[in-house]
């Protein structure tokens, strides 16, 4: 390749010299002839004739020189074109196709991966109020894995990598877990909602399963774990909740790998869900995860979406219901309250056994949509503050409400459900 270029340069220089010589013949020689004509031209030859003859001679020289240079240049240029094209197509093109093309493809893949990673907000908030952001699924990079139950689980890539490190660390302490669920489509979420409603009742489903489109599981960043104890898979909620000491060990480590516990006990009015020790969420930030876990705040509170408030609960005394019964009722109220955007719940108290009358039970059963008859009723009174700009039409903005009523009914084999509320 270098020799060919050197030959080309030599030809160009030579051609330039020829053209320069021709230019000298037509430009510099003509004035000299004019000078001679003035001193030596015969008397019978006019000055004009002398100039014309000189121009003709110069023109003949220029044309001859140009034709010779052009012929030489054309022949050598043709030779150069053939040689250069052959050399480039075999050596240069081969080098380009085997070196530059893969490098360009790799760079493009890297840029694409960086764009994808940068387009995902690992602190995204998806709950009963905030839906999955538009375009999220297009930017999501996921992996699939099969758990010990044989189920396929889809998880966002970085979340899965962090989970594997967490799992390895837990196993060093004799704690074994696996993935029950990760990312879910809207259709999958609807199926789960239907299954839980049929199996546990509408109240339990409402406080444990997100409305399709508003599930954190749509992000691919939320994981539901299950336990493996003595080689046995423990995956039913009512069974897993029986091992608080194991969950405590798990929760002590999750922040070190960028995870937080999402459905905190006592924070149902902020998260919208009852306590779920198995539900963890990846943030891709160990420092933030540690801060959230060490202070006991919710992700909603950390992001400033809600004021991190506690609710004063007064169960009073009851001969009809145990404290566990009443706790289940107040959790149902708090889970529902989380959908009241901008409102702050301050207190809840049980109104007393006197509300549980046949008349009130009949009143609850008369409500539209009741399919299974309630056999028990409970009334709670609460206080809360409405937001400055309320989007909830029944509420007056920036107002403190007291003794607000929540009426709940319970079927013989079901859980508590909110049937009516207001004054």
Image (cartoon, grey):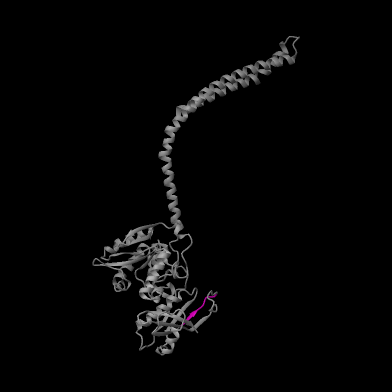
Tell me if residue 113 comes above or below residue 350 in the rendering: above
Tell me if residue 375 comes above or below residue 251 in the rendering: below
- Dividing the picture into quadrants, the one containing residue 141 is bottom left
- Dividing the picture into quadrants, the one containing residue 256 is bottom left
Q: Nearer the viewer, residue 296 or 109?
A: 109
Q: Position of residue 199 (x, y in %)?
A: 35, 74
Q: Quadrant of the N terminus?
A: top left
Query: Which residue ends up furthest to the left in the rendered image?
Result: 230
- Dividing the picture into quadrants, the one containing residue 243 is bottom left
Residue located at (43% from left, 47% from top) = 107
Tell me if residue 388 comes above or below residue 126 in the rendering: below
Q: Position of residue 263 (x, y in %)?
A: 39, 71
Residue 276 appears in the picture as rendered: yes
Q: Nearer the viewer, residue 102 or 363?
A: 363
Residue 310 appears in the picture as rendered: no
Is residue 127 shown left or right of residue 399?
left
Q: Position of residue 416 (x, y in %)?
A: 39, 80
Is residue 30 shown left or right of residue 196?
right
Q: Is residue 48 magenta?
A: no
Q: Position of residue 68 (x, y in %)?
A: 57, 19
Is residue 174 shown left or right of residue 318?
left
Residue located at (42% from left, 66% from top) = 216
Q: Nearer the viewer, residue 196 or 134?
A: 196
Residues drawn in magenta: 382-388
């Amino acid at each position: 390749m270098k020799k060919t270029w050197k030959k080309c340069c030599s030809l160009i220089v030579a051609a330039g010299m020829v053209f320069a010589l021709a230019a000298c013949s037509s430009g510099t020689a003509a004035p000299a002839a004019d000078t001679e004509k003035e001193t030596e031209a015969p008397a019978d030859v006019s000055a004009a004739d002398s100039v014309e003859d000189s121009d003709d001679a110069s023109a003949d020289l220029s044309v001859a020189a140009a034709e010779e240079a052009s012929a030489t240049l054309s022949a050598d240029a043709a030779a150069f074109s053939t040689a250069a094209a052959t050399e480039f197509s075999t050596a240069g093109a081969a080098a380009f196709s085997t070196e530059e093309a893969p490098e360009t493809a790799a760079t493009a893949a890297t840029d694409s991966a960086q764009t994808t990673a940068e387009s995902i907000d690992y602190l995204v908030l998806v709950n009963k109020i905030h839906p999955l952001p538009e375009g999220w699924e297009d930017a999501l990079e996921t992996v699939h894995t099969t758990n010990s139950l044989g189920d396929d689980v889809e998880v966002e890539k970085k979340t899965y990598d962090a989970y594997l490190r967490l799992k390895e660390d837990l196993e060093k302490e004799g704690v074994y877990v696996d993935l029950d669920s990760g990312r879910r489509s809207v259709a999958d979420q609807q199926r789960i909602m239907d299954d839980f409603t049929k199996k546990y009742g509408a109240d339990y489903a409402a406080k444990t399963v997100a409305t399709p489109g508003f599930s954190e599981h749509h992000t691919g960043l939320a994981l539901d774990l299950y336990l493996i104890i003595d080689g046995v898979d423990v995956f039913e909620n009512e069974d897993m909740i029986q091992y608080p000491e194991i969950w405590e060990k798990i929760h002590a480590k999750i922040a070190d790998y960028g995870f937080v516990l999402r459905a905190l006990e006592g924070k149902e009015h902020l998260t919208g869900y009852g306590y779920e020790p198995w539900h963890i969420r990846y943030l891709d930030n160990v420092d933030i995860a540690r801060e959230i876990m060490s202070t006991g705040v919710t992700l909603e509170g950390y992001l400033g979406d809600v004021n991190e408030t506690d609710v004063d609960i007064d169960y009073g005394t009851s001969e009809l219901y145990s404290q566990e019964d009443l706790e289940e009722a107040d959790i149902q109220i708090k889970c529902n309250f989380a959908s009241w955007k901008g409102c702050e719940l301050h207190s809840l108290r049980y109104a007393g056994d006197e509300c549980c009358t046949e008349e009130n039970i009949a009143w609850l059963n008369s409500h539209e949509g009741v399919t299974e008859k309630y056999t028990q009723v409970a009334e709670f009174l609460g206080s809360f503050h409405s937001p400055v700009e309320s989007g909830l039409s029944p509420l007056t903005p920036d107002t403190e409400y007291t003794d607000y009523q929540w009426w709940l009914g319970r079927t013989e084999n079901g859980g508590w459900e909110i049937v009516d509320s207001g004054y």
